Image (cartoon, helix red, strand yellow):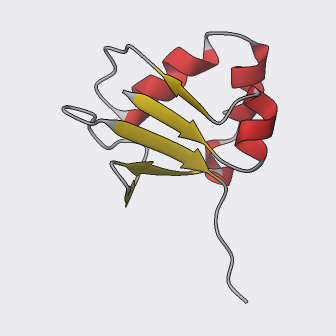
Amino acid sequence: MDVLYFAWVRERIGHPKERVETRAATVRDLVEELRAREDRYAAAFADLSALRVAVDQELRDFDAPLGGAREVAFFPPMTGG
């Protein structure tokens, strides 16, 4: 699946997008796999309350299933104004 990173998440990880082979059942499982890769991922995913996630372009929570998902995007909360 494609994993996209936006704003400071992209800055910490060092690239905007990557193709990931995963057996993760949920977004949270995917995050744990990514955290285990190396320190920059651990830093980007240190505080999940500071992140939002979309699965196939729909806002979801971290317990959302990934079965059949083609894209997961991580980004900070959006503010209006």
Picture layout, residue 74 above or below residue 16: below
Picture layout, residue 36 above or below residue 60: above
Q: Position of residue 20 (x, y in %)?
A: 44, 18
Residue name at image x 49 percent, y 33 percent: 3
Which quadrant of the view contains residue 24?
A: top left
On-image quarter of the C terminus: bottom right
Which quadrant of the view contains residue 48?
A: top right
Q: Position of residue 29 (x, y in %)?
A: 41, 24
Residue pushed farthest left?
68
- In the rendered view, does 39 fall on the left or right side of 66? right
Residue pushed farthest top?
37
Picture layout, residue 3 above or below residue 8: above
On-image quarter of the N terminus: top left
Q: Nearer the viewer, residue 12 or 36?
A: 12
Q: Position of residue 74 (x, y in %)?
A: 56, 45
Residue name at image x 36 percent, y 41 percent: 63
Residue name at image x 77 percent, y 21 percent: 40
Q: Nearer the viewer, residue 81 or 49?
A: 81
Residue pushed farthest bottom?
81
Which quadrant of the view contains residue 9?
A: top right
User: How many labels sit on residues?
Assistant: 0
